[in-house]
Image (tube, rainbow, N blue to C red):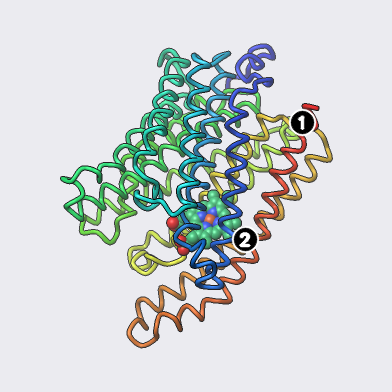
């Protein structure tokens, strides 16, 4: 194990770096928007047709999902920029970094406003007009240039650098791929079109996961004061699995399409092994870290442990969903939503928040207690939220397979009401927990500046 000397450690894991904080602030506001639109969507589950004329579910869902996706993307960019500046002393270009931010803000604002007015034109998850993909692509190209130029060379780089380089390139590639439907040759063949669409989405998630997992490894080393993880075999195994996953995990998104079954099984197995490895790395790290280091980074530590718990829960659900006989049932049910939200909140968001607390470096006891209380509230409510969706999904799957012809859709949906209500209540409580976390962080920073 490489243990860094004090001055080496400070140089590599610089503590006073504010790069990326403006990305993180906007991302946190997007997180709050995610919660707001999520609650509204959950109300529409419970009261079908609520605000149908002015603010229907068709508007609320894209507003919620896009806010969630941009919370993840923007905070991941901020964190990678920050950590990269810490490792390399500074970013290659401050101008590119600022322009990346401006382009993102312009694109995100325009996208959310256009949804508000019911202006669409894209596909699921990217429902906005394809023209608005241009600033996102440009911003991402700036990001790639800055990441590669800041890194300089490929020699003897730690695993997180490889993860960041791979993540930025693959994200752009798959984002472009998700727009192939604009070309008639792809759009006119339904199977080809859907396969490419789902392949690109699956790989895109793999791309941002590379940014997030890379940052996790960096943080584990930073907290433990070693380079134990960033050059370890298990972390490189995670990297190569992640890379394979990026390219092939899409197989499990297209169970219903006529493609060879072995593609689906391999991709599912790889996705799960990747989660298993990340879960194991965090678990081993947790047991090896000493009390002083843990307490110095207590907020990041707690969010990392929370993410580890959610890795386990997501794995359990993914294992169940991967069984082909079960997977056929789960399609188009709330089980898929539980899986997606469990992973984006429980794993992605908790990991991102652990980096955010590391970057903001909070040591005031009162602030730490309030944020921890927010985390515990969120964790408890999130579990009920997730379970409610799974139960609603099982009941819907049962109807889809066994009672489709005998029980009308409306009657079946009525039986799901109790689970939608517990989903709504737990969602509101989880949102309060996250709101406490974000608000306390904002408040802490405002007080520090004044
Ligand atoms: C950090 C917080 C959250 C994130 C990152 C997040 C993420 C997501 C994602 C990615 C989806 C798309 C799922 C899919 O298509 O399979 C989704 C859907 C949804 N979410 Fe969330 N979510 C969050 C919080 C919430 C909360 C607190 C609520 C409710 C109180 C909520 C309610 C919904 C609803 C109603 C849908 C639509 C499901 C459907 O189309 O049937 N979300 N969310």
User: Could you tell me which residue is drawn at 67 percent across and 54 percent down?
Assistant: 378
Image mark for residue 132: none
For label 2, being within 8 Å of ligand 1 is answered yes
For label 1, being within 8 Å of ligand 1 is answered no
The answer to the question of whether label 2 and label 1 lie on touching residues, with beta carbons closer than 8 A, is no
Q: Residues within 10 Å of mark 2 (few under 14, many from 20)?
A: many
Using the rendered view, name the quadrant where residue 43 is placed: bottom right
Q: Is residue 278 above or below residue 97?
A: below
Q: Nearer the viewer, residue 378 or 13?
A: 378
The residue labelled by disc 2 is: 427
Looking at the image, can residue 313 be seen?
no
Looking at the image, can residue 360 be seen?
yes
Sequence order check, earlier mark of 2 and 1 = 1
Q: Is residue 313 above or below residue 145?
A: below
Q: Nearer the viewer, residue 126 or 157?
A: 126
Q: Position of residue 1 (x, y in %)?
A: 57, 23
Give the SS element for disc 1: helix
Q: Nearer the viewer, residue 284 or 399?
A: 399
Image mark for residue 292: 1
Q: Position of residue 153 (x, y in %)?
A: 41, 13
Q: Residues within 10 Å of mark 1 (few under 14, many from 20)?
A: few
User: Could you tell me which residue is drawn at 60 percent across and 53 percent down?
Assistant: 35
- Left or right: 179 in relation to 98: left
User: Could you tell me which residue is drawn at 17 percent across and 53 percent down?
Assistant: 189
């Amino acid at each position: 194990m490489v243990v860094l000397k004090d001055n080496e450690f400070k140089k590599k894991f610089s503590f006073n770096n504010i790069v990326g904080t403006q990305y993180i602030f906007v991302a946190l506001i997007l997180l709050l928007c995610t919660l707001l639109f999520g609650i509204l969507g959950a109300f529409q589950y419970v009261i079908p047709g609520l605000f149908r004329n002015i603010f229907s579910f068709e508007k609320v869902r894209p507003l919620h999902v896009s806010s969630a996706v941009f919370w993840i993307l923007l905070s991941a960019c901020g964190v990678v920029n920050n950590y990269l500046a810490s490792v390399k002393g500074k970013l290659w270009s401050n101008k590119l970094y600022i322009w990346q931010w401006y382009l993102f803000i312009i694109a995100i604002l325009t996208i959310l406003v256009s949804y508000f007015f019911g202006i669409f034109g894209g596909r699921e998850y990217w429902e906005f007009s394809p023209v608005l993909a241009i600033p996102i692509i440009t911003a991402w190209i700036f990001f790639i240039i800055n990441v590669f130029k800041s890194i300089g060379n490929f020699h003897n780089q730690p695993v997180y650098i490889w993860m960041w380089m791979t993540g930025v390139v693959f994200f752009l590639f798959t984002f472009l791929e998700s727009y192939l439907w604009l070309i008639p040759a792809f759009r006119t063949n339904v199977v080809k079109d859907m396969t490419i669409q789902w392949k690109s989405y699956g790989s895109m998630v793999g791309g941002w996961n590379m940014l997030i997992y890379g940052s996790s490894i960096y943080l584990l080393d930073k907290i433990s004061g070693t380079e134990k993880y960033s050059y370890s075999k298990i972390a490189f195994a995670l990297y190569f699995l992640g890379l394979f996953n990026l390219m092939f995990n899409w197989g499990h998104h297209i169970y219903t399409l006529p493609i060879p079954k072995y593609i689906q099984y391999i991709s599912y197995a790889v996705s799960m092994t990747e989660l298993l490895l990340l879960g194991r790395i965090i678990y081993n790290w947790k047991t090896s870290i000493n009390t002083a280091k843990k307490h110095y980074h207590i907020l990041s530590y707690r969010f990392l442990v929370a993410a580890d718990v959610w890795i386990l829960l997501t794995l359990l659900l993914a294992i169940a969903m991967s069984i082909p006989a079960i997977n056929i049932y789960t399609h188009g049910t709330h089980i898929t939503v539980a899986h997606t939200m469990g992973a984006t909140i429980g794993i992605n968001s908790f990991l991102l928040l652990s980096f955010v607390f590391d970057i903001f470096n909070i040591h005031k006891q009162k602030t730490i207690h309030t944020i921890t209380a927010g985390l515990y509230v969120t964790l408890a409510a999130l579990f009920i939220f997730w379970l409610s969706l799974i139960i609603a999904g099982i009941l819907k799957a049962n109807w889809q397979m066994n009672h489709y012809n005998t029980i009308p859709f409306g009657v079946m949906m009525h039986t799901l009401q109790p689970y939608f209500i517990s989903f709504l209540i737990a969602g509101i409580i989880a949102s309060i927990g996250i709101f406490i976390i974000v608000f306390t962080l904002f408040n802490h920073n405002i007080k520090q500046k004044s």
